[in-house]
Amino acid sequence: MKVKVSRKAHFNAAHRLFRPEWDDEKNTEVFGKCNNPNYHGHNYDLVVSVYGEIDKETGFVMDMKILKALIKDKIEDVLDHKNLNVEVPEFKHLNPTAENIAVFIWNKLRPHIKASKDLEVVLYETPRNFVTYSGE
């Protein structure tokens, strides 16, 4: 029997959605206000879930203290209060959309979660707009 455990987290970050090879008109048409050349910010909410069998010794799918520390070290410390376009190397040439940020988070966490466990990332850019990524 598989069980899902989840940890919520939060970070604040600024970004700009644009493609440098497009002119201002096309960037504004596609990305609207998110194309602000002075950037704009979000209060991101994050839910990281791990699916797997319950360990017979500990009773855990995953020790939540370990998951909490991983999220802090690999995600919050890297993204919180940052300009994603400027301060996070992976987004210097990758548009920091919610979709791309969710994949980035999944890729940062995946190597630290046992291969026998499934990982899911849900990233809320706003309370009504969110992205889910499970590695597929």
Image (tube, helix red, strand yellow):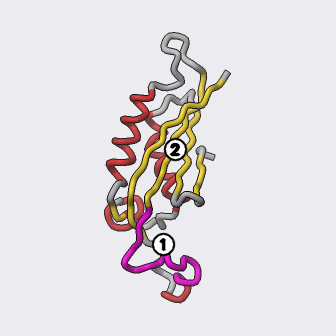
Vertical comparison of 39 with 76: above or below: below
Residue 98 vertical position relative to residue 108 in the rendered view, above or below: below
Is residue 25 part of the magenta span, yes or no?
no
Rendered image: mark on residue 17 = 1
Element on which disc 1 rests: loop
The residue labelled by disc 2 is 47
Pick the front one: 69 or 129: 129
Q: Position of residue 112 (x, y in %)?
A: 43, 34
User: Tag 2's secondary structure?
Assistant: strand
Local crowd size for mark 1, using a 10 Å CA cut-off: few (<14), some (14–19), many (≥20): many
Q: Is residue 86 left or right of residue 101?
A: left
Asked whether 41 falls inside the magenta stretch, the response is yes
**Residues tagged 1 and 2 counted as in contact (Cβ below 8 A):** no
The image position of residue 15, as x and y in percent, is: 41, 68
Mark pair 1, 2: CA separation: 23 Å
Viewer-side label of 1, 2 = 2
The residue lying furthest to the right in this view is 1
Vertical placement of 56 versus 28: above or below? above
Q: Amino acid at mark 2?
A: Val
